[in-house]
Amino acid sequence: MPTEERRRPAPPLPRRTLAEETLVVLSLSLLASAVFAILTLFEFPVRGGRVASVSQSTMLARQVFGSVFGLAPVWLVVYLVRRNGEGIGALGLGGERVREDALHGLALFALVGIAGIGVYLAAVELGVNRFVVPAPPLGHWWTVPVLVLNAIEAALLEEVVVVAYLITRLRQLGLTETASVGASALLRGMYHLYQGWGGFLGNVAMGVLFGYVFSRTRRAWPIVVAHLMLDVGAGLGYILFREHLPGFE
């Protein structure tokens, strides 16, 4: 009997799994476009064949939905490791060591923050780095909450996908620990090149440190906490001291 005839159809997946898969795929594709198109319609309603501008009452919604859909790749990674049986523990995302992970994250934050802010400002002064505003639009009651939300998005996206997931998969593909950490760090530096060469080198260095920490501890939460605190600290520092920073006008 031919092989094709002997194959049995795969058992149907649970409805919950299929529903989650559908939402993940849509969140990574056109669902975000649909949501933002709806917001645009409220912002600029069409009246009498002309576009009439209205107040930016949906700005907060844009900020929130931007962060929510920005986390779709993290959701995809979590979905994949759960579906294939590895579980989130394979990426160091288990919740069994909350206090220890938080303390290690704070220690990393202190280490990177103290060294990083001086290097960053020096790079801006030397002209090898652009000054990037690390905060959402100012002057709103939701500026700080959205700052924290954006920091959560960035911390989870970068540390779960670029560090935990990528290093894990590269190791499974046969790369050495050094090569896996190096590839992760290089990728981090590359998507920060918009800041300039200072941003590239600084993020490569941070990527090496965070990658090494993950590779040695197999825990992702400490680097997520450290990244979150770095972004919140940078944003609050800008809000409070922006008049004394380079590039402020």
Image: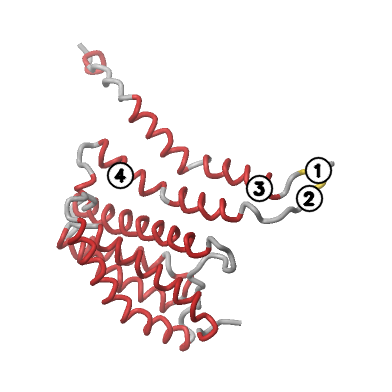
Of the image marks 1 and 3, the number of the one nearer the N terminus: 3
* Quadrant (top left, top right, bottom left, bottom right) of the N terminus: top left
* Amino acid type, callout 2: Ala
Circle 2 is placed at which residue position? 52
* Amino acid type, callout 1: Arg
* Quadrant (top left, top right, bottom left, bottom right) of the C terminus: bottom right
Q: Residue at x 30, y 63 (%)?
A: 225
* Badge 4 density bin: few <14, some 14–19, many ≥20, Cα 10 Å: many
Which mark identifies residue 40?
A: 3
* Amino acid type, callout 4: Val
- Furthest residue to the left? 216
Q: Residue at x 33, y 65 (%)?
A: 227
Q: Are dots 2 and 1 in contact, CB under 8 Å?
A: yes
* Amino acid type, callout 3: Thr
Of the image marks 3 and 2, the number of the one nearer the N terminus: 3
SS at mark 2 in the image: loop
Please state which of residues 230 and 206 is positioned toward the viewer in this rendering. 230
Which mark identifies residue 78?
A: 4
Q: Is residue 54 above or below residue 129?
A: above
SS at mark 4 in the image: helix
How far apart marks 2 and 4 lie (CA) works out to 42 Å
Circle 1 is placed at which residue position? 47
